[in-house]
Each structure stands twice: as structure tokens, then as C-alpha cells.
Image (cartoon, rainbow, N blue to C red):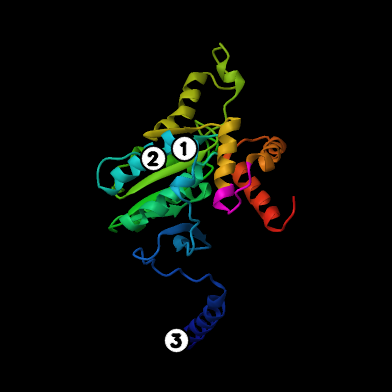
Amino acid sequence: MDQELARFLGRAEALLGRLEPLLPEQPQPIDWQVTQAARWQALPGRGGALVPIDHPQRMVLDDLFGIDRAKAALERNTRQFLAGAPANDALLWGSRGTGKSSLVKALLTRHAPDGLRLIEVDKDHLVELPQIIAAVRDLPQRFVVFCDDLSFGADEPAYKALKVALDGSLAGGRDNLLIYATSNRRHLLPEYQEENALTRHVGEEIHFAEAVEEKIALSERFGLWLAFHSFDQERYLDIVRHWLRRLGCDDAPDRWREAALRWALTRGSRSGRSALQFARDHAGRRRLGEP
């Protein structure tokens, strides 16, 4: 019997030895003195772990135009957080390409020397927020969990996990962590015309007013709401001018104005993103000597 057991254990050990190289490597602990940003990455069979972002995208606050009120509010909230003063989770919502994500990245650029660190979390991994909070709870740095382009249905597990994290649970313990999220939707969930109908129920929902309140409940858990709207024509052109100068192209407006407006028209958006994309295209053409 002992020999059979020994043979079985030997075969099991050999099998594990063959399987081990196929398993993903466990990430090494992050040195947050050096690392400024990380992302939460799912590991098959091992839950998830924080993985360093070696070269986070660098944005500069002074490059962000047309969002002065939101920029000042979020920068002030972040300074409060870094000082250990009360601060709020923040929802940045509004038109695409208006600088929501860039603002969060620019705050990291400015305040990383002050101890700010960024953790990027995909919407599908929000259910693992308790693990993320636990992973950084006892560290001296101050962390912002950044969830970009957030929107989901009320029945998704991530929706409920985020509600619990924002409202606080009995476990608590996130004094050194805030959540900043961006979304094109103010309430993060789809809304329908029939929800405004003056009826007593919508579809199978009898108490539809309560269902609407449920949709609003998540966004209201963010203490700071910041709205981002499309730019008017002159503001859009101001942003184009800024980026052309930053890219070393000092053309007079009569060389690029009409082309910039056509560029925005074809994309259906006068946004900061469109302005930067046009400026790259125009400056690159000029550098090659093309009209």
C-alpha cells in the first residue's frame, strides 16, 4: 500500500512539474516608491493582482483647455486627499473627447511627487475592489482607483460592487484610496423614454419610480460630479492653436482654420481630442513640406 501511495505521489509531482511552466507567473510585489501607476489584472485560477505600468501616459494640466471649472475642482479635491483632509470620490461625465480621462492622468503627472498613485481598473474587475483596497490599505501613498468609460446595467455584479465601495461597508479601510470614474452617462446606466411616462408601471415593473431611483442611486454615491460639455467653435480653434504651437507649427490661422473645421465636421465632434488629432496631422504634413 505504501509503495502504491509513493508511486501515486510521484506521478502527481511529475504532472505538477509539467504544468507549472504553463501557469502565468505571479507578479512581484510593487515598489510604490518607484511605480506611479498600476493596473489590476486578472490571473487565471489566481484571482487578480496589481501589475505596474512602466510608462504611464503623461498629460499636463496646462494643456487641458475649456474645462477650467472641472479642472480646478478635481485638482482641489486631490490636494485635499493628499493632505489627509476629507475628500470625495468623483464622477467625470459628459461628451466624448473633452478631457475627462486626460484630467485624471494630468493629476498623476503633477502630484506623483506628493505621493499620488493611480490604479487602473477595468469595469469588469470592479467586483474585485475589496481585494484592491486590501492590497494598498497599509501603504503610505495615496491611491486613486481610476475606472474609465464606466457604464453598465443594474444587474451586473460590478454595479453592486461599486455601490458598496462608494457607500462604504462594515469592512471600511480605504482612508488612503479614492475612486475617480469617467462616463458618457451622467447616471452610468441606460435610461429610456418610457421611464418619463405618466403611468403607474413600465413593462413588468410595477413600482417603476423605484427602479428609476435605483439607477440614480449609484451616481449619487460619488460626492463630486463634474460635467464636461462639447466646445463651441472658437474654443475648439483655440485648442487647435495651442497644440500646433506645442508641436512646433506656428502657422497663421488662415493656413489651418478651415481645414480644422472640416476635420471636426467629419468626426461630428468639436472636442479636445479632435483638436489634438488635427494638430498632429497638420503639423506632420507641414514638417514633410506638404500643404
| In the foreground, 279 or 68 | 279
Identify which amino acid the numbered label 3 is placed on: Asp
Question: Closer to the N terminus: mark 2 or mark 1?
Answer: 2
Residue 139 falls left or right of residue 10: left
Among the two numbered marks 2 and 3 on one chain, the one whose residue lies closer to the N terminus: 3
User: Residue 252 in the image: x percent, y percent?
Assistant: 63, 43
145 in relation to 199, above or below: below
Residue 180 counted in the magenta span: no
State how far apart marks 2 and 3 are (Cα). 68 Å
At which x and y percent is residue 43?
51, 62
Q: Which residue is mark 1?
A: 92
Crowding at label 3, few (<14), some or many (≥20) Cα neighbours within 10 Å? few
Picture coordinates of residue 153 (x, y %)?
55, 36
Q: Are marks 2 and 3 in contact (CB under 8 Å)?
A: no
**Looking at numbered disc 1 in the image, what kind of residue is underneath it?**
Leu
How crowded is the residue under tag 1: few (<14 C-alpha within 10 Å), some, or many (20+)? many
Judged from the image, the secondary structure of the residue bearing numbered disc 3 is helix
- Marks 2 and 1 sit apart, C-alpha to C-alpha, by 9 Å
Mark identifier at residue 2: 3
Image point 44% across, 34% down: which residue?
226
- Report the residue that reaches farthest toward the top: 198
Mark 2: amino acid: Leu
**Contact, mark 2 vs mark 1 (Cβ under 8 Å):** yes
Numbered range of the magenta stretch:
244-252
Q: Residue tagged by mark 2?
A: 74
Which of the two residues, 248 or 125, is positioned nearer the viewer here? 248
